[in-house]
Image (cartoon, rainbow, N blue to C red):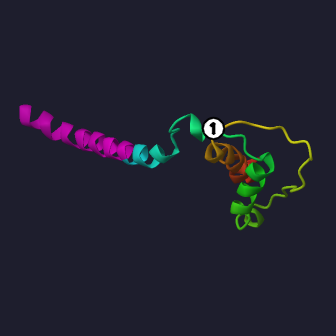
Amino acid sequence: MQQKHHAEALPSFQRIDNLIARIGVITRQLKPYTRKGPDDIVQPDTCDCVLGPLSMMSPQIPRMQVQIPQTLPPNLMQVMGDMVHIEQVSVNPLRHAHLIP
């Protein structure tokens, strides 16, 4: 009877072990995006924060069947933050724009 419980539990433990390994991989991938200190906080050019991700995603935009106006108003709000995080905030809506009806 004891051996039967061990045999039933083994697949569950293997799944848990695989999930723990996957969490470790994801954690290692995300570590470069963590803030290192106050030096990472900058006041970047807001136009660069918007146009950079547009440029990076330009090959994908035509396939998404969306129109994205690329003229920016001259008085864009200034922001403070980590450049990578600020650009990521622009990339996410662009990446998912085609999902909006």
* Residue 66 is inside the magenta segment: no
Q: Residues within 10 Å of mark 1 (few under 14, many from 20)?
A: some
Helix, strand or loop under label 1 = loop
Residue in view at x 32 percent, y 41 percent: 20
Q: Quadrant of residue 40?
A: top right
Residue in view at x 7 percent, y 31 percent: 2
Judge by depth and name the residue closer to the eye, 50 or 8. Answer: 50
Main secondary structure along the magenta-highlighted residues: helix
Return the x and y of residue 22 as percentages of the image width and height: 37, 46
- Single out the residue that lies furthest toward the right: 74
Q: Which residues are magenta?
A: 1-24
* Residue 6 is inside the magenta segment: yes
Return the x and y of residue 32 as percentages of the image width and height: 48, 47
Q: Amino acid at mark 1?
A: Ile
Return the x and y of residue 43 as percentages of the image width and height: 72, 40
Tell me: 47 left or right of 33. Answer: right
- Single out the residue that lies furthest toward the front: 39
What residue does disc 1 label? 41
Return the x and y of residue 58 as percentages of the image width and height: 74, 64
Judge by depth and name the residue closer to the eye, 88 or 97. Answer: 88
